[in-house]
Image (cartoon, grey):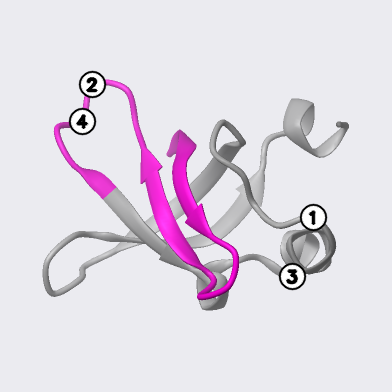
Amino acid sequence: MTGQVSYWNRALRFGFIRVPGVNHDYFCNSQGLSLEIAQHVRIRGLAPGNRVEFDTSPGSHLPHAVNIRLTPETAAT
């Protein structure tokens, strides 16, 4: 899936991803980050508006985003 970070708490390292046309957000945390962006997040953090690609897994309240990757246009900035 492809979506946009709608919220990221840098101190607690969790947030939410919004996908157009879906009526709920996907929960994400630092454990769901792919290795390719883990270093980017440690340095700059995710930010609202970052475009990401991710896989999903079931969660207790919201689905979880896992294997989160920055889209090529976001990674270039």
Residue at 77% in and 32% down: 72
CA gap, disc 4 and disc 2: 4 Å
Amino acid identity at mark 3: Leu
In-front residue for pair 52/10: 10
Numbered label attached to residue 44: 1
**At label 1, which amino acid type do we have?**
Arg
User: Image quarter for residue 38?
Assistant: bottom right
What mark, if any, has residue 22 been given in the picture? 4
Q: Amino acid at mark 4?
A: Val
Q: CA distance from mark 1 to mark 2?
A: 28 Å
Give SS at disc 1. Answer: loop
Give the CA distance from mark 3 to mark 4: 27 Å
Residue 29 lies left or right of residue 70; in this view the side is left
What is the magenta range? 1-25
The residue located at (40%, 45%) in the rendering is: 17
Label 1 crowd bin: few (<14), some (14–19), many (20+), radius 10 Å? few
Query: SS of the residue at dot 3?
Result: helix
- Across and down, in percent, residue 77 comes to 86, 31
> Considering only vertical position in the picture, is 75 above or below 45?
above
Q: Which residue is mark 3?
A: 35
Residue 23 colored magenta? yes
| 3 or 1: mark nearer the eye | 1
The residue shown at (88%, 32%) is: 76
- Whether the magenta-drawn stretch holds residue 67 is answered as no
Q: Look at the numbered disc 4 and give the secondary structure of its residue.
A: loop
For image coordinates 83% across by 67% down, the residue present is 39
Identify residue for label 2: 21
